[in-house]
Every structure is written in structure tokens, then in C-alpha cells.
Image (tube, rainbow, N blue to C red):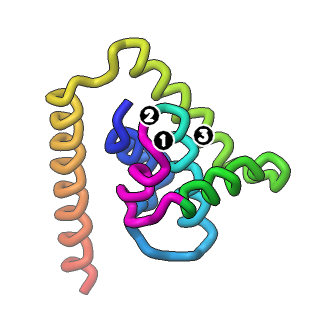
Amino acid sequence: MKIEQIKYLLEQELGITLKRKSRKRPYVYQRALYFKLCKEYTNQTFAAIGKTLNKDHATVMHGVKVFDNFRSWEETKYLEAYETLSNIIKQQINSNSLSKDAFIQRLLHDKINLKQQNQRLTNKLKNIY
């Protein structure tokens, strides 16, 4: 599994971008979940994982520790997302995962859908105002 695929799946699951620089809890917790998934399902170092979000290795290590506390903090939203994404990743690994072309096709499809949704919302706003 590649880091980009994990990032894409996580952003789709939780609906929050990982690139946003924020210390608000939802963003910090989503990054912690991302770091945990990358640690478990890739062969990348903490430094390499952190580099994908402009973070250093210490931030990744801390994020993994934060994730490990989710059970005691009863952060069910993130634990459920972790279970869901772990299952998806395991299935993709078992089925030889997505080829690069299939992954690009999925991204393209999602981009087209988002453009259409954006156009519909823009039209609705024009009609309101």
C-alpha cells in the first residue's frame, strides 16, 4: 500500500484534508490516524511519512502515541474509521491492491464528480441571490 492511497482513503472517509495546518482536535486526530495507518501498512520511515505532510519524524512518533490513546479516550469516531480503513487496506493488499492506472482513474472520477457537485452548488447559490 502506498502512502498516497492511504491519504486519499482517509480524506474520503473523514472528509477533512490532511494538508491543513491546524491544531484543532479533528485535524490533529486525523493526522494521528494517518500516521498510524502509514506505520502499519507501509515500509516508510517516520521521516518519510512526516514529509508527506511537512512534518518531522518526532511529530509522526507523537501522532502514533496519540492514536494509541484513542481507546482510553473513547474516540469512537476515529477508532471506527481506523477499523474501516484497515479492512479496506487489507482487502486491497490481498487483491494486489489498485494498480497505478486504476488509482488514477478513481481520482479522475472523483474529481469529475466534485466538479459537477461544485457546479450544482454554484448554480443554486446564483438562484438564491
Going from N to C along the chain, the mark reached first, 1 or 3, is 1
CA separation in Å, label 1 and label 3: 11 Å
Closer to us: mark 2 or mark 3?
2
Query: Given the image, on which type of amino acid does mark 2 rest?
Result: Thr
Circle 1 sits on which residue? 38
Query: Given the image, on which type of amino acid does mark 3 rest?
Result: Tyr
CA separation in Å, label 2 and label 1: 5 Å
- Residue at coordinates 37% horizontally, 58% vertically from top-left? 51
Circle 2 sits on which residue? 42
Q: Quadrant of the N terminus?
A: top left
Q: Position of residue 14 (x, y in %)?
A: 50, 52
Q: Position of residue 23 (x, y in %)?
A: 57, 76
Mark 1 burial class by Cα count in 10 Å: few <14, some 14-19, many 20+: many
- SS for tag 3? helix
Q: Quadrant of the C terminus?
A: bottom left
Whether label 1 touches label 3, CB < 8 Å: no
Going from N to C along the chain, the mark reached first, 2 or 3, is 2
Q: Nearer the viewer, residue 108 or 35?
A: 35
Q: Nearer the viewer, residue 48 or 80?
A: 48
Query: Given the image, on which type of amino acid does mark 1 rest?
Result: Cys
Determine which of the numbered discs, if any, sits on residue 82 in the image: 3
CA separation in Å, label 2 and label 3: 15 Å
Whether residue 4 is in magenta: the answer is no
Residue range corresponding to the magenta coloring:
43-57
Q: Is residue 117 rendered to the left or right of residue 90?
A: left
Mark 3 burial class by Cα count in 10 Å: few <14, some 14-19, many 20+: many
